[in-house]
Image (spheres, grey):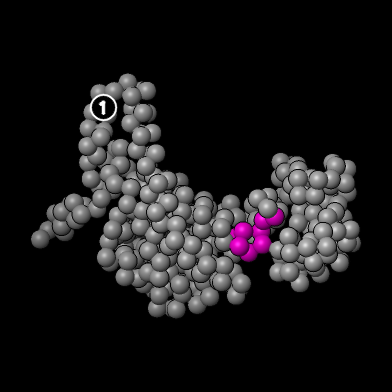
Amino acid sequence: MNSKIALVNSLKNISTEGQNPETLDIDLLDSLGVLQKINAEDKKVATIVGQLLPEIAIAVDYIVDAFANGGRLIYIGAGTSGRLGVLDSVECPPTFSVSSEQVVGILAGGANAMYKAVEGAEDDKALAITDLKAINLSVNDVLVGIAASGRTPYVLSAMAFAKEQGCKVIGISCSKNDNFAKHLDVNLCAVVGAEALTGSTRMKSGTAQKLILNMLSTASMIRSGKSYKNLMIDVNASNEKLYARALRIVMQATKCDFKTAEEALAKANNQTKLASLMVLTGLDVEQAKAALVTNHGFLRKAAEQQGS
């Protein structure tokens, strides 16, 4: 069979490529009507993702273990899926004060593909292996393959290679695919159904992927001591806005006033968690650092150990 015909026929089996019966009249509607149709479809996504919480929790446990053993969380994908992985990865350093090496986003076609499609990159199986070798993929790493269709050759190749290296492999997709699932330790398949605009997987599929990615990184960081209560206690005060946020977090965490928070942050070299522990316990900088090391970075445990 002609390869182009075969590809067209294969799309029939991908749920995200289906034609949504709820939006067949979307081209006849005014702006508000179009938006209501899109919004009605979007409302379904969180419920569908919610059904995957037990599986997402297993994935989080794998990532937490990887972090504890010096491993990384690595996202890999093509097109919208890959861009969402990169987006989640680059937000981790300022939010959690982790190295840019701890959460890595790999996009088929490289950095230029962030802004403009790189022809053929998503179909290049060898490129995926080259990209993973370039970052020295390790058995301690967790790889998350992201592909709305569940068929992207670049992603399938990456997951198969990671599995061969002994990595834990997690897959995020929005259409059931046995070939995708066979590479996985955890299969996060959020079947969101046909898009409001047929085949536009940057919509419901992208939203589902974004929700899952947010959960994976945020929950893993919380489980690794990167929060206190529900505060971003390890926020990196690298600019004016983030410094103001750090001040506010110290004040919220310790119930202290502005001046006390400011003085503590200065002594702690703008490390929000360290400053908060100093205010909570009265420890000096070196004592507070030691307490955090003893308690593996968990502020609540360190404070409780001091009787606070």
Residue shown at 59%/69% (left/top)? 67
Residue shown at 51%/58% (left/top)? 216
Q: Verify whether residue 226 appears in magenta.
A: yes
Q: Verify whether residue 212 appears in magenta.
A: no
Label 1 CA crowd tier, 10 Å (few <14, some 14–19, many 20+): few
Spot the residue most to the front.
Answer: 307
Spot the residue most to the left.
Answer: 1
Type of the residue with mark 1: Asp
Instruction: Give the number of marks.
Output: 1
Split into 4 quadrants, where in the image is the C terminus?
Answer: bottom right
- Seen from the viewer's position, the closer of residues 302 and 158 is 302
What residue is pinned by disc 1?
27
Spot the residue most to the top.
Answer: 30
- Where 211 falls versus 305 (above or below)? above
- Per the image, label 1 sits on a secondary structure element best described as helix
- Where 241 falls versus 165 (above or below)? above
Residue shown at 71%/69% (left/top)? 296
What kind of secondary structure does the magenta stretch mostly adopt? loop
- Seen from the viewer's position, the closer of residues 157 and 206 is 206
Split into 4 quadrants, where in the image is the N terminus?
Answer: bottom left
The image shows residue 12 at horizontal and vertical percentages of: 18, 51
Q: Is residue 32 left or right of residue 65?
A: left
Would you say residue 94 is visible in this rendering? no
Residue shown at 32%/52% (left/top)? 191
Q: In this view, does 130 lie to the left or right of 244?
A: left
State the extent of the magenta-drawn residues as a range.
Answer: 221-228
Q: Is residue 226 left or right of residue 22?
A: right
The image shows residue 172 at horizontal and vertical percentages of: 39, 58
The image shows residue 239 at horizontal and vertical percentages of: 72, 45
The image shows residue 175 at horizontal and vertical percentages of: 30, 55
Res. 19 image quadrant:
top left
